[in-house]
Amino acid sequence: MDMSEEKHKAMGEKQPKDQTKAQASGWLFLRRPPAVLDPIRRLFEPPRRLIEPYVKKGQVVADLGCGSGYYTFALAELVGPEGRVYAVDLSEKGIQALEKKVDEGGYHNIEAHASSASDVSFIKDRSVDFVLANGLLCSMADHRESAVNEIKRILKSTGQAYLSLGFPTPLGLVDQAEWEKILEGFRVKRRGGSLEKWAVVSVKPEVV
């Protein structure tokens, strides 16, 4: 066996190990429950219960990792016709399903984008009152830091973000150390305990 074959074999043995975690996370987090199960899901996880304390009429909000819109439409109803909801998800199928519901429901305050949360350049700086990133960061195999920076960029100085993780490592991609590092970049207003990885945060004031 020559050196190139040996190197290729070594890379081939290493690569699946590197990919296993991301593939597992993709299956768990990106393959969301089908929309037909939403009525059952609402019995145990009513969308308004999570978001209602943070959202008011007329606000601009961003639902990052929105899927087919489980929280999006509750957000749209809370902000009302004078508000706006940016619904963002990497899955084009999810966004297509959401846009179909938008048309059928006659919503005019939802703007949907098939995009990574690490690049929401279509949202202006300091323009968003509330960001929902529920189970987003733990499902991102790459560019989590960029997604966090985008949340900081779009949030108003008076805005808030709800960040939460799903499964802990090794199923999720964010361990305790990274979670604490993420939160250090924000002003933490409320947070869950060691078994409940969620936090309500705002941007830190700029140092002049």
Image: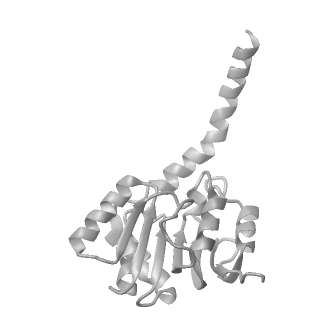
Q: Where residue 88 sits in the image (x, y, percent)?
A: 45, 64
* Residue 188, quarter of picture: bottom right
- For the residue pair 71 and 161, the one nearer the viewer reads as 161
Q: Is residue 9 left or right of residue 87?
A: right
Protein image colouring: one colour
Q: Is residue 185 left or right of residue 111?
A: right
Question: Which residue reaches farthest front?
Answer: 208
* Residue 198, quarter of picture: bottom right
- For the residue pair 103 and 12, the one nearer the viewer reads as 103
Q: Is residue 193 left or right of residue 158?
A: right
| Residue plotted at (40% across, 60% down) | 33
Tell me if residue 72 comes above or below residue 160 in the rendering.
above
Q: Is residue 139 visible?
A: yes
- For the residue pair 202 and 191, the one nearer the viewer reads as 202
Q: Is residue 167 visible?
A: no
Q: Is residue 102 left or right of residue 8?
A: left
Q: Where residue 8 sits in the image (x, y, percent)?
A: 68, 21
| Residue plotted at (44% across, 75% down) | 45
Q: Where residue 172 sits in the image (x, y, percent)?
A: 62, 56
* The N terminus lies in quadrant: top right
* Residue 111, quarter of picture: bottom left
Tell me if residue 129 comes above or below residue 97 in the rendering.
below
* The C terminus lies in quadrant: bottom right
Tell me if residue 12 comes above or below residue 31 in the rendering.
above
Q: Where residue 136 sits in the image (x, y, percent)?
A: 55, 63
- For the residue pair 47 and 202, the one nearer the viewer reads as 202
